Structures are given as structure tokens and as C-alpha cells.
Image: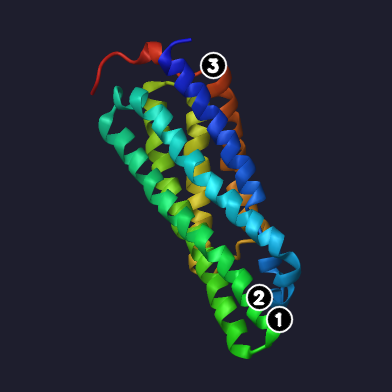
Amino acid sequence: MNPNRRAAAAAGVLVLAGVLAGLLSVVSVIEQPGFLALIPAHESQVLLGAVAQFVMIPAYVGFALCLYPALRTVNETLSLGFLGFRLIAATFHFAGVIMLPLFVLLGQEYAQAAAPHLEALAELLRVARDLVNHVALILALGLGDLLLFCLLYRARLVPRWLSAWGLLGAGFAMVASLLVLTGLTGVVTPLYLTMNAPLGLQSIVLALWLIVRGLRTERIVSPR
């Protein structure tokens, strides 16, 4: 197996690891009414979410690093932009990781003294986490994905239908984040989940393609 083939397979595995970690990072208790009083009984769920989101950092960045050597031979500008946005997204991921243990601390304080200011602080923290995870993070990933799928589409390193699917999925995901930012939808709503579903499904298909088939590196002629 040549280096590009191994790198593509590793990238596919990292995508699947990121998808699994993303599912485990969902902390449903924080989305429930009166969540601050519920947190002490669900501390393990909150901490698992933090660990899972931390795992997403090397998975997301590692995916870009695995593909970068091959992509840069096709278009250095687009590949560098893709990697850069992945690194920016990793920063937002890290911010999301740090926020989750703060919910545990607030929940413990609230259990000892149910003060209204703690509820207000917890709600502010929840809104901040939603803006980081579902707006800033998704927009950074989306911009990077647009560069990636544009490059893949132009160079035909994967089937064009798969690249086009990714472009559309990234576009829908970014629009969903803008709807969250403007308050037109929430993060746990049928509309938001439906708009993110195409990219989620495409990520799994792309991962399997990379593992089984890899990139069409024979189409790489020379650096541009």
C-alpha cells in the first residue's frame, strides 16, 4: 500500500472516530428545562461529553493532516485553507470541552444553595456553548469543507457526486448555524437536525470510500 493510500485510509478511520465521538459528545441533560438541578445526577454524562468532544479534536485535525500532503500537490492554496479552518475549529472544540466541567461545578453549587444567580449564569454558559459548538465551530468546519470539496471536485480525487454532496451538505450546515445565530431555530430542533443530516451522512460515505478506495492519486499530475 503506497503512502497516499495509507494516509487516505487513516483519514477515513479518523472521520468515523470523529462521528462516533460526536454522538457521544451530546449532553442531552443540558437541553432540558431546569437542567442545573439535574446535573448532579448526570455528572457522568456531562464528563463523558467533555471527553468525547476532546477526542474529536485529534480526529478532525488528523483527518486534515492525513490528506494535506496529497491535496497540496493539486492546489496548495485550497489545501492550506482547509487545514487552517480545521485548526480554527479545533480551538472552538477545545473551548467547548472546557465549558462542560463548568456545568458540573455550577450544578454542585446549586445543589448546596439554589440561588437564582446560578441559574442565570448556567443559562448564559449554555447559550455560550451553543454559539461555540453550533455556530462558530460549524461555520469554521463548513468553510474548510467547502475548500476541501471544491478541491476534490475539481481534481476528481473522489467521485464528483460525492464532492458535490459534500458541498451541498456543508452549505446546509452553515445555513443552519446562521439560523441558530439569528434565533430562528434552536440546536435541538427537527429543522436544525435535518439541515445537518446530509453532511453527516456524506461524512460516513466519504470515510468508507477513503478506507476502501482511497484518493484517485493517478489524477494528480503536478503542483498548481
Residue 49's mark? Answer: none
How many residues crowd mark 3 within 10 Å: few (<14), some (14–19), many (20+)?
few
Task: Give the class, few, some or many, for how many residues have Cα within 10 Å of label 2's Cα (few <14, many ≥20).
Answer: many
Q: Earlier in the sequence, mark 3 or mark 2?
A: 2
Residue 28 seen in the figure: no
The colour scheme of the drawn protein is rainbow
CA–CA distance between discs 3 and 1?
53 Å
Q: Which mark is residue 107?
A: 2
Circle 1 packing at 10 Å, graded few (<14), some (14-19), many (20+), is some
Quick check: marks 2 and 1 in contact, CB under 8 Å? yes
**Image vertical order of residue 102 relative to residue 23, above or below:** below
Please name the residue shown 60% across and 73% down the image.
105
Look at the picture and state if 198 lies above or below 38: above
Q: Quadrant of the C terminus?
A: top left
Marks 3 and 2: which is nearer the front?
A: 2
Tell me the element at label 1: helix
Residue 198 image position (x, y, % from top left): 59, 41
- Which mark is drawn over residue 111? 1
Q: Secondary structure at mark 3?
A: loop
Classify residue 164 as left or right of residue 45: left
Which badge, 3 or 1, comes first in the chain's sequence? 1
Q: Residue at x 54, y 16 (%)?
A: 213
Residue type at numbered disc 1? Ala
Q: Quadrant of residue 121?
A: bottom right
Q: Is residue 172 left or right of residue 71?
A: right
Residue 151: where, in percent of width, then height? 37, 30
Which residue matches tag 3?
Answer: 213
Q: What's under tag 3, amino acid-wise?
A: Arg
Residue 129 placement (x, y as % from top left): 53, 65
Q: Secondary structure at mark 2?
A: helix
